[in-house]
Amino acid sequence: MEVEGRRVPGARAAPQEAFWAWFAQNTEFLKQYDTNRDPVLDEIGRRLHEVHEGLTFEIGQAADGIYDFIISAAGIQEVFPEVVKLAKAAPRIEGWRIISFRPRAVDGSKQKLEYGGMTLSYADFWYQSEDQGEKLGLMLFVRGLSEENETTVRVATYLMLDTALGEFDVETKIGSIELEALPEDPATMGLKPFKDLAAEVDRRFPSTAH
């Protein structure tokens, strides 16, 4: 509670403010996410769930030496406002970059995804698109898809879409997503390479600030 811009003594801080106060005071502990993995990640998760149980995160050090802390809704659109609220409440923390939603990979076409015993890259995905009004429907053709591994491939596909488009765009600009096995010669069937998907989404939909 605040009166004339001042916090009333004894009043409890908003959960977003409490989280960032803890974060700013424990940056050296947080930097141990790789060497002291379980305690660090468990404590971050616990603190985030005190703000909202739907929030998740990623943490890592970028090539420029800055530590990235990514606040995510795990693809649950109802939690998106909580991500925005927490990110906007973040203070400037030296050496850290606070990012709302899992961003697009800088060059996802060079990345490989390992999930459920499978290794997939952009080359393993082709697609057809369908205008669905405010969203783009996708038929994704995936190399190695079978009835036995469909569940695994579907999860991997969503992870690959996050890499290509970013979490926010996947949830707000992509409509139906269907999967089919990749044919031997997808180009002759008029399918489009996965690396072209981001450009198509950007052409169809203007960038949305969040």
Image (cartoon, rainbow, N blue to C red):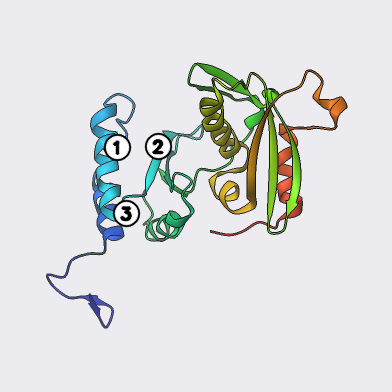
Query: Along the line of sight, which residue is nearer the eye, 140 or 205?
Result: 140
- Calculate the distance from the C-alpha at mark 3 to the C-alpha at mark 1: 20 Å
Q: Secondary structure at mark 2?
A: strand
Among the 4 quarters of the image, the one containing residue 193: top right
Q: Residues within 10 Å of mark 3 (few under 14, many from 20)?
A: some
Are circles 2 and 1 on residues that touch, CB within 8 Å?
yes
Q: Residue type at mark 1?
A: Leu
- Give the side of residue 1 with respect to residue 76, left or right: left
Spot occupied by residue 95 in the image (x, y as percentages of width and height): 39, 43
Identify the residue at the far left of this view.
Answer: 10
Q: Nearer the viewer, residue 114 or 110?
A: 114
What residue is drawn where x is 71% and y is 48%? 201
Distance CA(mark 2)–CA(mark 3)? 18 Å
Q: For residue 49, which numbered disc appears in the image?
A: none
For the image shown, how many numbered marks are present on the structure? 3
Residue placed at 45% from the left, 57% from the top? Answer: 78
- Marks 2 and 1, the one that precedes in the sequence: 1
The picture places residue 33, in percent across and down from the top left corner, at 32, 31
Task: Find the residue positioned furthest to the bottom.
Answer: 4
Q: Which residue is mark 3?
A: 52
Say which label, 3 or 1, has the lower sequence index. 1
Q: Is residue 161 above or below residue 53?
A: above
Q: Position of residue 184 (x, y in %)?
A: 78, 18
What type is the residue that disc 2 sits on? Answer: Ile
> Could you give the CA–CA distance between mark 2 and mark 1, rounded to whole angstroms?
9 Å
Q: Quadrant of the N terminus?
A: bottom left
Q: Which residue carries the number 2 mark?
A: 59
Between residue 115 and residue 179, name the one nearer to us.
179
Question: Circle 1 is placed at which residue position?
Answer: 30
